[in-house]
Amino acid sequence: MNYKKLFLLIFVCSLALRSFAADPVEEGRQIFNARCASCHNVNKKLVGPALAGVTDRRTVEWIENFIHGSQKMIQAGDKDALKLYNEFNQVAMPDHPDITKEQVAAILDFVKKETEVIVAKAPFARPGQLTPAYVPVEASNWEFFLGYGGVVLLLILVLLLAVQVKSTERENGGKFF
């Protein structure tokens, strides 16, 4: 009987602790808003670069090192750090040595999730390969030939009418009526 109570107590505690564990994306959002949002945006360049796709451009290890000590990396001559430093008017990013690897991962999860949300909300998509509206004329396309023949017949009738009007004017001495 005691084992059942112990098992039940462990099960309830694990459920309670699990419910208090923060979602990594939400934790990343909170850290980003508190520590990063004053200089960074997911999509726009502000004081610092836009962070959308940052894990495609840099390794997670490089990002962690840059967050912990960007000025050390610049002084050490890291080419990517120097490029960012020069691109953003030599404004150095403040060092954040207190941010843990788990917190960096949470921030990167938030940036990735936010990028996916923004792409999903895009008002338009890039068009794929467009198909031309031109359709070649085929011998079996009787509607085209019927319409084309009707227009030619109409033009011939207008031309015959104009010739008839002109010949009537000549017969009447320049007057049609």
Image: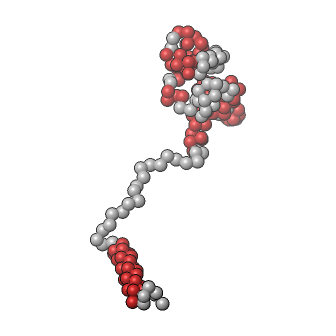
Image point 60% across, 19% down: which residue?
Answer: 89
On the picture, is 28 further left or further right than 138?
A: right
Image point 36% across, 63% down: which residue?
Answer: 135
Query: Residue 173 appears in which quarter of the rendering?
Result: bottom left
* Position of 169 relative to 17 (above/below): below
Return the residue nearer the eye: 141 or 126. 141
Query: Residue 133 appears in which quarter of the rendering?
Result: bottom left
On the picture, is 36 further left or further right than 137?
A: right
**Where residue 100 appears, x then y in whole percent?**
62, 20
Return the residue nearer the eye: 150 or 118. 150
**Where residue 123 appears, x then y in whole percent?**
58, 48
Q: Residue furthest front?
A: 173
**Does the rendering let one see residue 9?**
no
* Position of 141 relative to 117 (above/below): below
**Where residue 53 appears, x then y in whole percent?**
53, 32
Q: Residue furthest top?
A: 76
Image point 46% across, 87% down: which residue?
Answer: 175
On the picture, is 17 further left or further right than 123?
A: right
**Where residue 70 appears, x then y in whole percent?**
59, 15
**Does the rendering let one see residue 38?**
yes
Q: Which quadrant of the figure contains the N terminus?
A: top right
Query: How has the structure been colored for display?
Result: secondary structure
Image point 61% across, 24% down: which residue?
Answer: 48
Return the residue nearer the eye: 160 or 177. 177
* Position of 22 relative to 129 (above/below): above
